[in-house]
Image: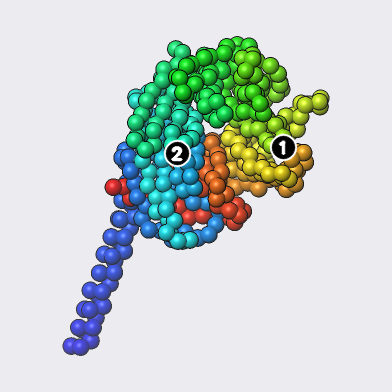
Amino acid sequence: MKLWIILADLRLLARVTRFILRLRVALLILAVVATSLPVTSARAETSSLADGLFRTYAVLGNPKHVAVEAPGRIWFTAPSIDAVGVLTVVEINDRIVEYRTRYFFTGAGSKPYDLVVHNGVVWFTLSGTSELGRLLIATEELTHYPLALNSVPHGLALRENDATLWYAAQGGNALGRFDTATSLLTEFPYPKPNAGLEDIAFGAGNEVWVTATQGNEVRQFDAVAETFQLAVPTGVGGAPISIAVDVFNFPWVTFAETGDISRYAPGTLALWRRFAAPLSAGQPAGIHIQGDSFSQRIWYTLSAAGAVGYFHTRNSGQLLTPHINFRLPGLNSAPWGITVDADGAAWIADSGANQLVEWLPPYFEPLYLPVIARQE
């Protein structure tokens, strides 16, 4: 009799254990599925994170570009849902992360593309409706500024010394300037037709640099004289995409078709010092530069390879360390924009896998754990 009671208790315990396991699996599936729901806020479950290479944050909208407001507060464009979003991360301790995502919808078909964050304001290009957008962070007030018809603005940059926004009007084949104080808008026709303008960066003084993807060149514009100056060819099929200027005022550019990350080298026959991307068919896209008086770290994304990387150079351009690169976690990864916050974490917009990725210092430990979110 006692033996029968013991066996019955064991059978009951087994059934309860199976029920608990099934319940845990069901809750996990619900948490994952919830990340695809069209809501505007989310909160992460308490999750243990190993110190490692990446933290991944599921978002909506196929994020294209990222900008840092402050460490742990990252803005991004979400073109497929016509919104800009903000990710807020709170580190409770070294192994636990909580985060929220919010979305600010910008109108049907607006397709936000690039963005900058400065002094409590988010500025962004709306490629689908040919507008600039402004979001006041404190009040959440959203304003649209119409551009020229079929302007299709892509790259965006803020020139802080005179508070002007500059944008690459891909559809209008023009370089645009918007005065944030007066709302005065001026567009400067690009000298080469159908050049496919993509990205903007500022050099010393009055220099504005713009990449022309289809024109296979990078061109310098004088913001005071209001004229295009130097044109630097990138070679047939170069397809320059993103641009950043280093501490010595030399532009660095990602070449999508030739697979190079290159530094402008005036006075040389080639005009560019090329650093070949380590993964074949990687298609370099985004770029970001960290520099000091001695060296600089060149960050880049490889969209077609689903990878990110960096390398070190002296300020002279001499290579100090080889490429460090990794493929990102996530299905169909296709990273584009990349930036670095004040704590040294790199942030990547992965449009293919619908995620933001945080690349943690020291950048080369091959471990990651995803953050699983539940929706509110």
Which one is in front, 353 or 8?
353
Please give the label number shown on residue 75: 2
Residue carrying label 1 = 275
**Residue type marked 2:** Trp
| Residue at left offset 57%, top offset 29% | 161
Please give the label number shown on residue 53: none
Which one is in front, 156 or 198?
156
Query: Residue 315 sits in which quadrant?
Result: top right
Query: Residue 5 sits in which quadrant?
Result: bottom left
Answer above or below: position of 194 versus 59.
Answer: above
Where is residue 370? Give x, y as percent. Answer: 45, 52
Count of marks, rendered view: 2
**Residue type marked 1:** Phe
Q: How is the image coloured?
A: rainbow
Residue 256 in view of the camera: no
Answer above or below: position of 157 versus 88.
Answer: above
Real-space Cα separation, disc 1 to disc 2, in angstroms: 30 Å
Where is residue 138? Give x, y as percent. Answer: 37, 38
| Residue at left offset 52%, top offset 24% | 164
Where is residue 363? Give x, y as percent. Answer: 60, 52
Answer above or below: position of 301 versus 129.
Answer: below
- Label 2: how many Cα within 10 Å (few below 14, some 14–19, many 20+): many
| Residue at left offset 60%, top offset 28% | 201
